[in-house]
Amino acid sequence: PAAALPAWPSGPLPALVPPSADTAVSYSEAYYTRLTIHRWGSYAMLPLFVGQALVGQKMYRDLDTGGESDLEDLHGMLAFGVGALFTSNTVTGVWNLWEARKDPNERTRRTVHAVLMLAGDAGFLATGMLGEEAGDGRSNANTHRAVAISSMAVSTVGWLLMTDLFRR
């Protein structure tokens, strides 16, 4: 006689079921140190974005006067802060992502967060490159601004993903 086919599983697909409490992965002490650095750095992200947006908007309005803005130095310092923050958090985040690679708990959330933040990294790199030309006219400033705001939005979604709003 032919073998009976297994019954179709009921309920959520196995891949969507959270791993059991028996799944234990140990992390190094360095992991927790990097995680602390990463979290503290992330607290600076939104204030830097707000500062950059306010200063950038004022500079954008100053284009209409035809002169250079008195805020270029401040905008540059804030941009340096964003770059330093994203460099630090990329190093600590990727390093911890690698160490957590065998931990099935919240793997999808960690991975989506990492992809969004790396997209933000790329966007901020492009924003910086476009910044050199932003003072040369409205079109260049529009492109710089659009890429900056998009990068901030993608990064903010990635940041929000790791907050308690999305914890089970």
Image (cartoon, rainbow, N blue to C red):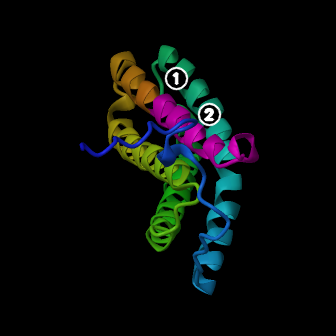
Q: Is residue 137 left or right of residue 97?
A: left
Q: Is residue 65 left or right of residue 126?
A: right
Q: Residue furthest bottom?
A: 29
Where residue 143 appears, as percent x and y from the top left, is 37, 24
Mark 2 touching mark 1, by CB under 8 A? no
Magenta range is 148-168
Q: Is residue 139 magenta?
A: no
Secondary element type, mark 2: helix
Q: Quadrant of residue 130?
A: top left
Residue 71 can be seen in this image: no
| Distance of label 2 from label 1 (alpha carbons) | 9 Å
Q: Main secondary structure of the magenta part?
A: helix
Amino acid type at circle 1 is: Tyr
Q: Which residue is mark 2?
A: 55
Bin the neighbour count of mark 1 within 10 Å (Cα to Cα): few under 14, some 14-19, many 20 and up.
Answer: some
Bin the neighbour count of mark 2 within 10 Å (Cα to Cα): few under 14, some 14-19, many 20 and up.
Answer: some
Where residue 25 appears, as percent x and y from the top left, is 57, 75
Secondary element type, mark 1: helix
